[in-house]
Image: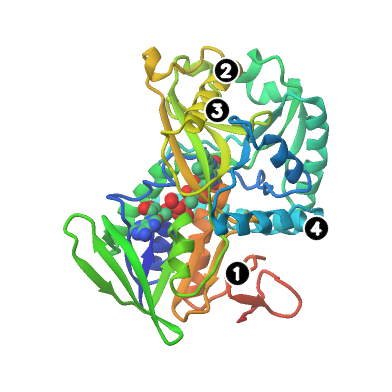
Amino acid sequence: MKTLVLGAGIIGISTAWHLAERGHEVIVVDRQPDAALETSFANAAQISVSYCEPWANRHAPAKLVKWMFRNDAPLLFRPRLDWQQWRWGLAFLAQCNDAAFERNVQQLVALGAYSHAALKDVVAATGIAYHRLERGIAHFYTDQKAFDDAAVAAGLMQEFGVDRKVVGRDELLAIEPAFRNFDRIVGGTYTASDESGDARVFTQKLAQLCAARGVRFLFGHDVERLEKVGGAIDAVQVRDRATGRVQRLHASNVVVACGSYSAPLLRQVGVDLPIYPGKGYSATFKLKKPADAPFVSSIDDEVKVAMSRLGDELRVAGTIEVSGYDATLDSRLSQDRCRMLAERIEKVLPGVCDTRLPEEGGDPRFWSGLRPATPTNIPYIGRTQVAGLWVNAGHGTLGWTHGAGSGKAMAELISGRTPRMNFRFHGFEPAKGGFAADAELSLR
Ligand SMILES: Cc1cc2nc3c(=O)[nH]c(=O)nc-3n(C[C@H](O)[C@H](O)[C@H](O)COP(=O)(O)OP(=O)(O)OC[C@H]3O[C@@H](n4cnc5c(N)ncnc54)[C@H](O)[C@@H]3O)c2cc1C
């Protein structure tokens, strides 16, 4: 069966890999010249099954108001004349309560656990190397009240089967001594089973392996239009960026995995999903003192910034800005946010990285990407009301963590099988008795 996969980020490439493994004929289309050149390019590198709490919680509305005018705010909503942004914001507010939070965490943990197993299987089968570190993820706190609250959050995660433990300052420094010179740390939490690695390297290598097993790639092609006839997908119109040549591609199945751009594409055929860009930033610094740099991937709670070691570099990333599709680094706000990453890392790990800005003779690689954010932080994986049209998008802050499993689950669904996880697939509903791992799914 022929399947078109639109988008060659971590989600599209994982989908293509798992479809090819199940004997499908696959064509991947992407506007970029290679895989993983947009949001999957330089993220925080965390495989974060346990640190998966969505941004929408009962404290978020007050924080959003407090942070609205601060350029260094971890979560920034800058209102625009954009109905989609307002609609997304209202849906986000509707998730800011304890019941929704717990429901969303359950789904994110289920997808995370399934995905982690899928990632390990792919790595074992392919031997892909991507600066993987299986050293866990630590979350450290500088504020006593926030640290006390962390124990409550850890308790909730333990109820969902996540082994997140609360550690005092000394225990945290025994787990990761690199933070010993940052005396403001009061304690942290730690999950040994989490890990880290470079999403871009992994995705590009997996794309090469896809090509080697027969997947065709149309790089440098814009997906311009989805066309339906009656209630079914009929064609996908693409344009070659180099020559301008237009083609109409046909296939039994079409998977939209275009990250934040999935929403406007799907709306062309009446599929309306609340996926909106959440801009984030990263900086990649050369290590000056590799022996003093952390191996344990970490989250700095005060500024909500994550850091992961990737070989002889440190990737530092964070913050989310709900303000449209601009992924450039040109604005004053973007420059402030990049500078904040450099200044913070110098405080937490003094002298360990070369954090000098370009104007000071340094060579940091700053980057920004648009997280395909949903109000729940749960992605849409499943089928649409248009026959033959599938969606695998909306992975928000966790697309690298959920990539391998989202691709595998999509391939299972297209192959007519039920993925073995307790997850609410889009366009399907569970059999009576809830989402048991073996539950039969039926079309809504
Ligand atoms: C700062 C930051 C830090 C992050 N840290 C982490 C982390 O530590 N752990 C984690 O799990 N996740 C993290 N994420 C989230 C993760 O990176 C994303 O969820 C993930 O990359 C989304 O993958 P995707 O394949 O859906 O999108 P993308 O990687 O953006 O892929 C979509 C593809 O579609 C293509 N495309 C789009 N529109 C068109 C079109 N019209 N025609 C042709 N091609 C098109 C694009 O070129 C792109 O290649 C982070 C994100 C950011 C921004």
Q: Amino acid at mark 1?
A: Phe
| Tag 3: amino acid | Phe
Mark 1 burial class by Cα count in 10 Å: few <14, some 14-19, many 20+: many
Kind of residue sitting beneath label 4? Ala
Looking at the picture, tell me which residue is in the foreground, 312 or 247. Answer: 247
- Mark 2 → mark 3, Cα distance in angstroms: 13 Å
Q: Position of residue 39 (x, y in %)?
A: 44, 46
Q: Residue at x 58, y 21 (%)?
A: 344
Question: Which numbered disc flags the more N-terminal residue, 2 or 3?
Answer: 3
Give the Cα separation between the discs numbered 4 and 2: 38 Å
Residue ID for mark 3: 295
Question: Which circle marks residue 349 in the picture?
Answer: 2
Q: Nearer the viewer, residue 404 or 105?
A: 105
298 shown above or below 289: below
- The reply to whether discs 2 and 3 touch (Cβ–Cβ < 8 Å) is no
Q: Which mark is residue 425?
A: 1
Q: CA distance from mark 3 to mark 1?
A: 36 Å
Rounded to the nearest whole Å, what is the CA distance between mark 3 and mark 4?
36 Å
Query: Can you tell which quarter of the image residue 257 is in?
Result: bottom left
Residue 158 position (above or below residue 290): below
Mark 2 neighbour class, 10 Å CA radius: few under 14, some 14 to 19, many 20 or more: some
Give the mark nearer the N terminus: 1 vs 2.
Answer: 2
Q: Earlier in the sequence, mark 3 or mark 4?
A: 4
Q: In this orientation, which residue lies closer to the viewer: 329 or 150?
A: 329
Name the spot of residue 70 as percent of width and height, x first: 63, 31
Write down the quadrant of residue 227 in the picture: bottom left
